[in-house]
Image (cartoon, coloured by chain):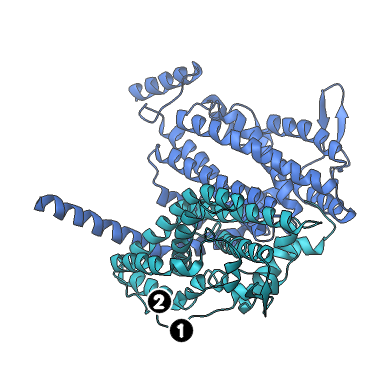
């Protein structure tokens, strides 16, 4: 047994529970970011970027589906990918708080994606050799997508940071504003000691992430916030910001109005 | 003057011989203007048409439905881009086309000035609106201007896919709960007549049609296309168990076509003039996105210039 958090309560975990939690972290991150990015549809700064951001949203939601499908198998019974997405409440969601932060302006969206995409790239690169075949398969399939996403958001950070005075200022503000949500991605979770070492420990990615984001921010002529600054936490335990309630209210409204329906 | 006439005659016989006009060929100025108007209008329709569907992406009731809708709207953005490029081959810059859309000088399909209050509209739009668009676009794959005809071949393939997906959404509703069936019927009630209006004014009131037919830009009249659409769609509605909201709709054995009721042309012209329920909202949305993105586009341009200068510097240093 190893300790962890379930719905805000600290308790011991079996390895099966720890495995599910691992999947929920990844699936909920993907769904949340996909949902947030999809709100840019028809609102992008230029048509080509509308297409790019919709494509990215598609990738994230597609990946979330694969992970939820596997979770549904583990849960058994009447659980499906859709009951997991549409009929869980905020306490059951495990996404990092970063991903429920509002879209804001283009720079805010880019900063959020940049922090997450960089993390995601290192994560999925390593997960390709995970002992869990489903996860390894998802990682293999996802790597091309997440590489492209990490490149896309880093390029925008550089373009905006080293663009005009206005964009430089805006991008710096976005980086500063979202920084305190980045640390949660690298939290250590003792429950994952129940899983073998091929399940990447998130804390192990912190150094390489700091190095990479530092490089990109430097090229973008932006100031790197201190990694020692206070970081927010809670999402992995089911304790979220107020934003999540609105995201779920919107996303789940139709499905929950017609719980008997299939679509 | 004499040379002009002979050039125009030559052009007409070229088109009559079913040869494709390419960007480098001589063409009458009015042919060029007509095409720019039509292609840019088509591009604007794809772009404005993203809005009523984007409206439901965040609320799509299943993850599969969300993915399908996202992919569809992405296709539309792609079609818009493709068509803008096609119009640019005629010498019209994209910035100018966008400015004309935002000022109201350029039009887009009036159907997108109707709201989408119901999820069922995501099905009905695919089924009827994309269905009507295909009717028109299949004809345009044979249009006389080469780049437009080729764009249409690609676009038609994706549009017929959208139509099948839309029909599937409606079918799932009609096989569902009583509330879902009601949703599907209510949506059809709202979209049926505006869909028939998509083909434009009746033939005796269509000022641009005759010349366009002569130049083989257009190959079938508005009324012919509308009739084909009705004939095709009625059995589809019957199969779904839905009722088309037209009490005059009846099979006419002697014509071999369905007869249908009178279209409310007052409504059509009012919506075209800007008085539909969403005309102002659609343009305001487009303008806001464009203005909100101005600093981003400026930054991208500034960065590209800096990059080019750095490259030049490197090159001259080497």
Q: Reply above or below: B281 against B190.
A: below
Q: Nearer the viewer, mark 1 or mark 2?
A: 1
Residue B101, position as x, y percentages in the image: 50, 53
* Chain A image colour: cyan
* Chain B image colour: blue
Q: Chain of mark 2?
A: A
- Farthest residue to the left: give it: B317
| Identity of the residue drawn at 51% across and 55% down | A127
Q: Chain of mark 1?
A: A
Residue A3, position as x, y percentages in the image: 63, 76
* Picture quadrant where residue A207 is located: bottom left
Kindly identify which residue carries mark 2: A173
SS for tag 2? helix
Residue A119, position as x, y percentages in the image: 46, 63
The answer to whether any part of residue B133 appears in the image is no
Kindly identify which residue carries mark 1: A230
Q: Reply above or below: B199 against B44.
A: above
Q: Reply above or below: B312 against B230.
A: below
Can marks 1 and 2 be said to lie on one chain? yes
Q: Quadrant of the N terminus of chain A?
A: bottom right
| Identity of the residue drawn at 65% across and 30% down | B221
In the picture, measured across the screen, residue B316 lies left or right of residue A34, that is left
* Picture quadrant where residue A77 is located: bottom right
SS for tag 1? loop
């Amino acid at each position: 047994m190893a300790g962890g958090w379930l719905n805000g309560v600290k308790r011991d975990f079996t390895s099966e529970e720890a495995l599910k939690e691992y999947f929920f972290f990844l699936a909920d991150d993907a769904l949340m970011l996909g949902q947030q990015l999809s709100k840019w549809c028809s609102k992008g700064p230029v048509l080509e970027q509308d297409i790019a951001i919709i494509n990215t949203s598609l990738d994230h939601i597609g990946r979330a589906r694969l992970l939820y499908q596997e979770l549904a198998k583990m849960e058994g019974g009447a659980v499906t990918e859709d009951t997991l997405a549409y009929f869980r409440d905020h306490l059951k969601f495990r996404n990092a708080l970063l991903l429920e932060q509002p879209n804001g302006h283009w720079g805010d969206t880019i900063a959020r994606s940049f922090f997450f995409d960089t993390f995601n790239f290192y994560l999925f690169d390593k997960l390709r050799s995970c002992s869990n075949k489903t996860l390894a398969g998802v990682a293999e399939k996802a790597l091309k997508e997440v590489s492209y996403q990490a490149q896309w958001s880093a390029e925008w950070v550089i373009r905006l940071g080293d663009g005009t005075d206005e964009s430089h200022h805006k991008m710096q503000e976005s980086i500063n504003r979202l920084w305190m949500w980045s640390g949660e991605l690298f939290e250590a979770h003792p429950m994952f000691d129940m899983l073998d070492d091929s399940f990447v420990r998130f804390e192990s990615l912190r150094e390489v992430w700091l190095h990479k984001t530092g490089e990109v921010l430097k090229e973008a002529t932006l100031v790197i916030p201190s990694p020692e600054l206070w970081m927010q936490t809670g999402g992995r335990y089911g304790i979220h910001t107020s934003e999540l309630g609105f995201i779920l209210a919107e996303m789940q409204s139709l499905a929950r109005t017609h719980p008997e329906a299939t679509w | 003057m004499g040379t002009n006439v002979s050039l125009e005659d030559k052009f007409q016989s070229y088109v009559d011989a079913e040869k494709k006009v390419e960007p480098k060929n001589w063409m009458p100025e009015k042919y060029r203007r007509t095409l720019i108007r039509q292609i840019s209008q088509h591009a604007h329709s794809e772009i404005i048409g993203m809005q009523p569907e984007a409206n439901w992406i965040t609320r799509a009731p299943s993850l599969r439905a969300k993915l399908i809708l996202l992919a569809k709207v992405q296709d539309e953005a792609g079609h818009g881009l493709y068509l803008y490029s096609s119009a640019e081959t005629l010498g019209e810059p994209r910035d100018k086309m966008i400015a004309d859309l935002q000022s109201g000088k350029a039009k887009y399909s009036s159907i997108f000035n109707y709201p989408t209050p119901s999820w069922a509209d995501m099905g009905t739009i695919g089924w009827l609106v994309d269905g009507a668009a295909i009717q028109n676009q299949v004809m345009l794959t044979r249009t006389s201007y080469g780049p437009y005809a080729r764009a249409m071949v690609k676009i038609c393939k994706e549009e017929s896919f959208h139509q099948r997906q839309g029909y599937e959404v409606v079918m799932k509703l009609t096989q569902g709960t009583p509330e879902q069936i009601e949703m599907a019927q209510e949506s059809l009630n709202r979209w049926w007549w505006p869909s028939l209006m998509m083909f434009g004014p009746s033939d005796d009131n269509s000022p641009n049609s005759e010349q366009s037919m002569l130049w083989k830009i257009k190959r079938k009249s508005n009324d012919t296309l509308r009739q084909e659409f009705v004939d095709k769609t009625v059995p589809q509605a019957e199969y779904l168990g839905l009722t088309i909201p037209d009490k005059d709709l009846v099979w006419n054995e002697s014509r071999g076509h369905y007869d249908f009721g009178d279209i409310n042309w007052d409504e059509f012209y009012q919506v075209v003039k800007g008085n539909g329920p969403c005309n102002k909202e659609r343009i305001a949305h487009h303008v806001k996105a464009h203005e909100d993105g101005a600093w981003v586009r400026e930054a991208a341009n500034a960065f590209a210039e800096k990059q080019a200068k750095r490259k030049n510097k490197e090159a001259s240093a080497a």
